[in-house]
Every structure is written in structure tokens, then in C-alpha cells.
Image (cartoon, rainbow, N blue to C red):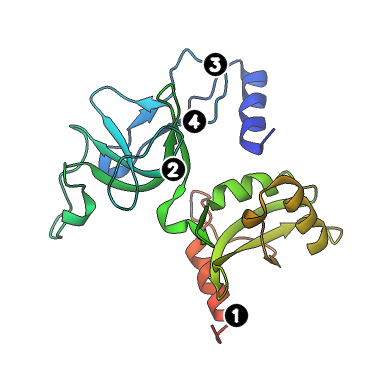
Amino acid sequence: MAATEQTAARWLEVTGCAMIEGWGMTEGVAVGTANVITDRKFNGTIGVPVPSVDVIVIDDEGNRVGVNEAGEMCVKGPNVTSGYLNRDSSDDFTADGYFRTGDIVSMDEKGYFRLLDRKKDMILVSGFNVFPNEVESVMLDCDGIIDCAVIGIPDEHQGEAVKIYIVPADNNVTKEVIKEFALDNMTGYKCPRHIEFVSELPKSNVGKVLRQKLREKHMSDNPQL
């Protein structure tokens, strides 16, 4: 059971209340999708579009993708902004008027959306998409890992390689243990090729990992790149 699912299950056990997951952004007045409030079972999705909001999922060419295929989430509705003040917003919308959120999602057969990652954080390894959130979720189940964050770094053979920053519980957590756990639980191209131990991860005031800071740290530590 992944860490998020464990948290939700424990919350339901202690409080008797379900945690209703959803999705929103400032440009959509903070609401776009939500799970059905009567569904008390954690499903790991961000739910379905709220009334009056339409959601599509597109690839890099602007074509709509199929069921369970990853793509950029685009939204349209009366709550969605028409643009940014004093800025050309044409690139922020699709040709048919959907706002590009920058979030990568997939939609299942029942119309529920699963949030995968931010488009800007996606890693391209030998032509395969790797989502940092997915790798982090798996690696947090490894004994001795308190926290972790994944970024993509330049690689002359693969285009990009997966690098993981780890906050270890103690000295018993080694790179060999981490690599073995990753290979046992993920497809090879998703496994971190580079591992760095840190005492803490850079985070925002709301606890979100600042991956850009980690990318800057990597470049600073490797000026030859």
C-alpha cells in the first residue's frame, strides 16, 4: 500500500470520515474535479469534473489521447480564466479554447482522472516518459527512506537519466539497497541511476518539494555539464 493510501486509510479508521480528493488551480477558481462525496473508498484519483467544467487530455501535438493514456490536462468552464493581465495568453490555450494546466493526467474507463505529475517535471529516458511522483511513491516504501525527490538530469546516452535525492533514516540505507529495491519494484528505465543523500529537501511553505531547486543544485555541483 502506497504512503498516500495508507494515510487515507488511517484517517478513515480514526475519524470515520472519508478524505475526498480533488484538483484545482488558481486559474480555475481553485476547483475543477472532485471525487464523489458518497464514495468512502480511497481510489487514488482526483475524481471527475465538477458541474459546468469540461476536461480533455491531449498529447504534445494537441491531439486527444485515449483512455488510460497520459497527456496534458486542459480545462474549460465559466470558472476558468480568459487570460493573464498584460500578457499574451494565446499559448496558454488550445485552439478550441481549453486552458492548458501543465498537469499530466490519465482518464480511466469510468471518467475518473489520475494526476501523474507536472509536465515540466516529466523525465524523458530513451523516449520513455518517467513521472517523478510515481518513482517517489514507490521509493518511499523502501525501509529507511524518510523522504525523497526525483529529477531528470542530462545523459548523453539516454537524453535524460533519473536522479533521486534521499533523506535517509540512518546509515544502514545504502545506494546498493536503494538500487536493488528500485529494480525489484519498477521497470528498468524508471529506476534511479544517480543517488544522492541529503539531510533535507527544499520545500515551499506548504510542504511541496521544489524540484527546480534540486535541478539548480545538481548543475551547481556539476559545473562541467
Q: Residue furthest bottom?
A: 224
Q: Residues within 10 Å of mark 4 (few under 14, many from 20)?
A: many
Q: Which residue is mark 4?
A: 45
Q: Which residue is mark 2?
A: 70
Chain-order first, disc 2 or disc 1: 2
Determine the secondary structure under disc 1: helix
Determine the secondary structure under disc 3: loop
Q: Are marks 1 and 4 in contact (CB under 8 Å)?
A: no
Q: Which mark is residue 40?
A: 3
Q: Which residue is mark 1?
A: 221
Residue occupying the point 65% across, 62% down: 165
Chain-order first, disc 1 or disc 4: 4
Q: Is residue 22 left or right of residue 184?
A: left
Q: Quadrant of the C terminus?
A: bottom right
Q: Quadrant of the N terminus?
A: top right
Chain-order first, disc 3 or disc 4: 3
Chain-order first, disc 1 or disc 3: 3
Going by the numbered disc 2, the residue's amino acid type is Ala
Q: Residues within 10 Å of mark 2 (few under 14, many from 20)?
A: many
Determine the secondary structure under disc 4: loop
Cα separation, mark 1 vs mark 4, equals 37 Å
